[in-house]
Image (tube, grey):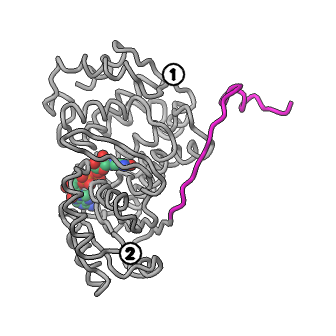
């Protein structure tokens, strides 16, 4: 028999999956940020704009000094969800400084602004992520105009160079560490049950889950421990790659729908939803269940719920001010145009997941 049972089972007759990879150059290692001047040189850039959020100010200053005359401007105004008004301010700086490259240091907010600048100025982007959100390895940009978010996907939006320096994460507060790592875990988990999963995305998602679930409890115990922080950052890289390659399901749809409707914090929302979506989906996603059980033991839902319960901040939708009588409308919107998902996505099922998280 030319075709194996396994192939027939997973990609049934008439179904072909497509795996695309977009080129980017990734540097990984403690102290890797010190190689940024060389990387800038490699890009042939001589007029660099530095974009950093407050938490990365010290790293930004250090880099500015290392780049010397090649650092021509700084912009500190990046905020969550990439509002086009802020991008407009940053573009004025790009033009005034005649910048020929942008270097971003920070979480998804700084990197999102870097992508928005690239979309307008077409200059190279070197990203130094300081959270586990994963935006640095996706060709996706979500921008908001008057509170309405629009997302676009274009290979040109992927930062051409990513520098993972674990030292930039050592002082990340425990709460942000937890929610950001669970945000990353959600990318991996949804890739495990994605309908367009390939052997590559499945391998990345499995290893990402193993790294994140293994390292997070260690990092929560010892937030500045280098080996576990390194594992967490590696897991976030792989998980971000999953977000870039596989279609996301109910978990991300709920996060988008709730986040958009009630203006909720991105990583906290992911943290309070994931165990509930796992409980709903795993009975319908045998491969994901099998792979997660190999990591967590019998009960992946309990393992993720225990991590979420360790968060010293809002843990339920109600704690974020989401009204109970707003859940049915969100469930109906999700059910009207569901993302691909292994578990049922009718309004009643989705509302039950939301009520559990509430
Ligand atoms: P963020 O970048 O908004 O950072 C959250 C807060 O943590 C900020 O105040 C920041 O200054 C601080 N911070 C960041 N790193 C820190 C560190 N190491 N130590 C201490 N404080 C630190 O949050 P985020 O979760 O990284 O990114 C969220 C944004 O990124 C959202 O707009 C989301 O939509 C976007 N995002 C986009 C993609 C994509 O593929 N396009 C993927 C993931 C997230």
As drawn, which residue projects farthest toward the bottom? 69
Left or right of 88? Residue 307 is right
Q: Is residue 279 above or below residue 232?
A: above
Q: Which residue is mark 1?
A: 284
Which region shows up in magenta?
A: 1-24
Residue, x 52% and y 48% (percent of image)? 207
Left or right of 216? Residue 325 is left
As drawn, which residue projects farthest toward the right? 1
29 inside magenta stretch:
no
Gap in Å between the C-alphas at discs 1 and 2?
43 Å
Q: Is residue 41 visible?
A: yes
Q: Which residue is mark 2?
A: 31
Query: Where does residue 297 sit, x and y in percent of width and height?
Result: 48, 35
**Number of other residues with Cα within 10 Å of mark 2, as a class: few under 14, some 14 to 19, many 20 or more:** few
Q: Is residue 220 above or below residue 187?
A: below
Name the quarter where the N terminus is drawn: top right
């Amino acid at each position: 028999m030319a075709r194996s049972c396994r192939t027939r089972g997973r990609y049934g007759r008439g179904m072909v999956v497509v795996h695309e990879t977009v080129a980017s150059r990734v540097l990984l290692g403690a102290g890797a940020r010190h190689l940024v001047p060389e990387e800038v040189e490699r890009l042939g850039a001589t007029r660099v704009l530095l974009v950093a959020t407050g938490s990365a100010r010290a790293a930004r200053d250090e880099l500015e000094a290392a780049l010397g005359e090649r650092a021509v401007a700084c912009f500190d105004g990046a905020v969550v969800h990439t509002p086009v008004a802020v991008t407009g301010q940053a573009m004025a700086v790009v033009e005034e400084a005649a910048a020929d490259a942008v270097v971003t240091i920070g979480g998804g907010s700084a990197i999102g602004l870097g992508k928005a600048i690239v979309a307008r100025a077409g200059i190279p982007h070197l990203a130094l992520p300081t959270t586990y959100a994963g935006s640095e390895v996706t060709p996706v940009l979500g921008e908001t105009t008057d509170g309405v978010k629009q997302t676009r996907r274009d290979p040109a939006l992927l930062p051409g160079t990513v520098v993972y320096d674990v030292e930039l994460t050592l002082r990340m507060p425990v709460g942000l560490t937890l929610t950001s790592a669970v945000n990353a875990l959600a990318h991996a988990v949804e890739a495990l049950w994605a309908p367009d999963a390939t052997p590559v995305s499945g391998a990345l998602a499995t290893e990402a889950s193993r790294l994140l679930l293994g390292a997070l409890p260690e990092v929560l115990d010892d937030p500045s421990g280098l080996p576990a922080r390194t594992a967490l950052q590696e897991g976030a890289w792989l998980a971000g790659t999953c977000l870039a390659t596989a279609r996301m399901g109910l978990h991300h749809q709920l996060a988008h729908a709730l986040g958009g409707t009630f203006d909720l914090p991105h990583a906290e929302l992911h943290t309070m939803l994931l165990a509930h979506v796992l409980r709903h989906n795993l009975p319908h996603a045998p491969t994901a269940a099998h792979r997660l059980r190999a990591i967590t033991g019998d009960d992946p839902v309990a393992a993720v719920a225990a991590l979420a319960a360790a968060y010293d901040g809002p843990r339920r939708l109600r704690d974020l001010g989401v009204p109970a009588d707003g859940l049915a409308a969100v469930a109906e919107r999700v059910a009207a145009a569901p993302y691909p998902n292994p578990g049922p996505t009718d309004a009643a099922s989705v509302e039950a997941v939301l009520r559990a998280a509430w």
